[in-house]
Amino acid sequence: MSTIDTLQSLTITRPDDWHLHLRDGAALASVLPHSARQFARAIVMPNLKPPVTTTAMAQAYRERILAALPAGMRFEPLMTLYLTDNTDPDEIRRAQDSGFVHAVKLYPAGATTNSDAGVTDLTRCYRTLEVMQEVGMPFLVHGEVTDQDIDLFDREAVFIERVMRPLRRDMPELKIVFEHITTKDAAQYVAEADGPIAATITAHHLLYNRNEIFKGGIRPHYYCLPVLKREEHRLALMTAATSGDERFFLGTDSAPHAVGAKETSCGCAGCYTALHAMEMYTEAFERAGALDKLEAFASFHGPDFYELPRNTEQVTLKREAWTLPQTVPMADGSLVPLNGGEQINWKLL
Ligand SMILES: NC(=O)N[C@@H](CC(=O)O)C(=O)O
Ligand SMILES: [Zn+2]
Ligand SMILES: [Zn+2]
């Protein structure tokens, strides 16, 4: 064992979360402290009901987030806009000028939670995407095709061929983040592509393969989109995350849903990890013998891609076993964190 494997504590630059769902209202107030405890900043997803489609809506949402932050906590929400077939190219210029909108998000219509207002055909958005390319506004992509005749487990790989390659051929300078990648196909595509592209990787896709959803029965808290994949894909994600390649960085995709919306005959997609995401990532990197690569993945590659300053504060993770709560109270019902009731071996101080 190398010395780093036996470390009792690990001090790194405070990380950021480059893909986070904070929701709104009572749910926002319940989940925000969990993220703020761990992360200095987060890219906040715009898939509210109704979706955050304008700079004015993003500004109002940002103010609600800051108002929900408990006294004494610091956290910077980095706002995003939800792309629709009708997003006006001028909206991109307003967003860019705002200073607080940092990206625009693609939800293919019907692909995931609250994506009904999403894009039906990306070519309809080309004038808007051209302005994004021109001003350097990052384009964040939920990369799954929605065709019902494509197997659920193949939707990300097919997206690369049908959407990503044509898009990048047409807009080679557009900055793209391939969000929450789940396959070796996506990891390889991002590692090898020319031009400005990166990918976020969740902690749960590093730690689990699809067996987890069905262990001993159907376990809805492990259901998210894109769905967990085969072990070979998990291994490819681990290799990418721990490679030191600056194109891969941390994005939890923590996605809170009230327990009743998960534990039901047709449960929502989304894993809640904001409570313990850094501990989960640390566990994953330790298993790969790559704790020395965690800081760059969690704290450097993201701000570098977004052209934001790196954080200067530090945080410490201690090797200390603790048991996650079974549930987290939420004003409108409770929330089950991923691995609720189980033990985790690291603790963020
Ligand atoms: N990841 C998920 O399974 N769900 C996310 C949406 C998303 O990121 O696709 C959510 O908003 O609940
Ligand atoms: Zn998504
Ligand atoms: Zn998400």
Image (spheres, rainbow, N blue to C red):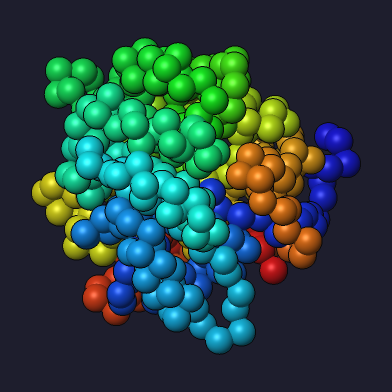
Q: Position of residue 51 (x, y in %)?
A: 26, 55
Residue 253 makes an appearance in the image: no
Number of numbered labels in the structure image: 0
**Residue with the most extreme right position:** 3
**Residue with the most extreme front position:** 90
Residue 22 makes an appearance in the image: yes
Quadrant where the C terminus is found in the figure: bottom right
Q: Position of residue 252 (x, y in %)?
A: 49, 49
Q: Position of residue 305 (x, y in %)?
A: 63, 39
Please name the residue shown 46% across and 22% down the image.
Answer: 171
**Location of residue 248 by image quarter:** top right
Of 84 and 92, nearer the camera is: 92
Q: Is residue 281 above or below residue 29?
A: above
Q: Is residue 339 above or below residue 142?
A: below
Q: Is residue 32 left or right of residue 278?
A: left
Please name the residue shown 21% across and 18% down the image.
Answer: 150
Please name the residue shown 54% across and 25% down the image.
Answer: 173
Of 231 and 241, nearer the camera is: 241
Q: Is residue 266 above or below residue 77?
A: above
Of 266 and 99, nearer the camera is: 99
Please name the residue shown 44% across and 53% down the image.
Answer: 95
Q: Position of residue 141 (x, y in %)?
A: 40, 35
Quadrant where the N terminus is found in the figure: top right
**Residue with the most extreme left position:** 265
